[in-house]
Amino acid sequence: MARREIEDLECDQPFALAAARVIEVRAEELFEQSPGVLDLDRIERVHDMRVAVRRLQAAIEVFRECLPRKRRRAALKQLRALADALGERRDPDVSIEALEGLAAEIGRSEDRSIAALVERFQEEKEAANERLARVVSEVRLQRLRGDLGELAGAAREFGAGGRRHS
């Protein structure tokens, strides 16, 4: 996943206005990855969404001083839950890929022990995907989208008026 360039940033603009723009762009990147994230055959989508979540979390931490604490914490809590579910879903993919690579390297792709491990990781992957489905439900993603929009809006308001957040 290529990181998107953030346009409309000026070095002389208030920090809080930059925060709003960065949060908006990083949130867009995250939501662009959500279609197809539950497709068990599109493992890159899970990876890309994890990367987008980490970038957004980092942006929120960088700009924490101009973000309202309650909204910031609420958004980070949701992002942590999403990151955890994505990580749980991604781990079996990494293991399966490593096992299949090992089997090919040693020329034993039909090895029963490797096949059994791959099967176990496939089962873990399916179970993790069910848990991920709850975290990326339309209702939860819409709530996250709204919370991130409010967070960016609060930063924009702070940058425009210089009001202090609690």
Image (cartoon, helix red, strand yellow):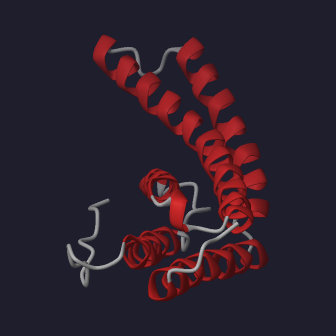
- Residue 151: name its quadrant: bottom right
Q: Which residue is at 35% across, 76% downward? A: 14
Residue 47 coordinates in the image, percent (x, y): 46, 50
Task: Determine the residue located farthest toward the left in the rendered image.
Answer: 11
Q: Could you tell me residue 163's position as x and y percent?
A: 58, 80
- Image quarter of residue 76: bottom right
Residue depicted at x 47% and y 60%: 63
Residue 54 % position (x, y): 48, 51
Q: How many marks?
A: 0
Which corner quadrant holds the C terminus?
A: bottom right
Estimate the x, y position of residue 109 in percent, counting from the top left.
Answer: 42, 22
Locate residue 8 relative to residue 124 in the image: left or right.
Answer: left
Q: Is residue 115 left or right of residue 15?
A: right
What residue is at 28 percent from the left and 70 percent from the top? 4
Identify the residue at image location x=46%, y=71%: 23
Image check: 58 left or right of 150? left
- Rendered view: 36 above or below 79: below
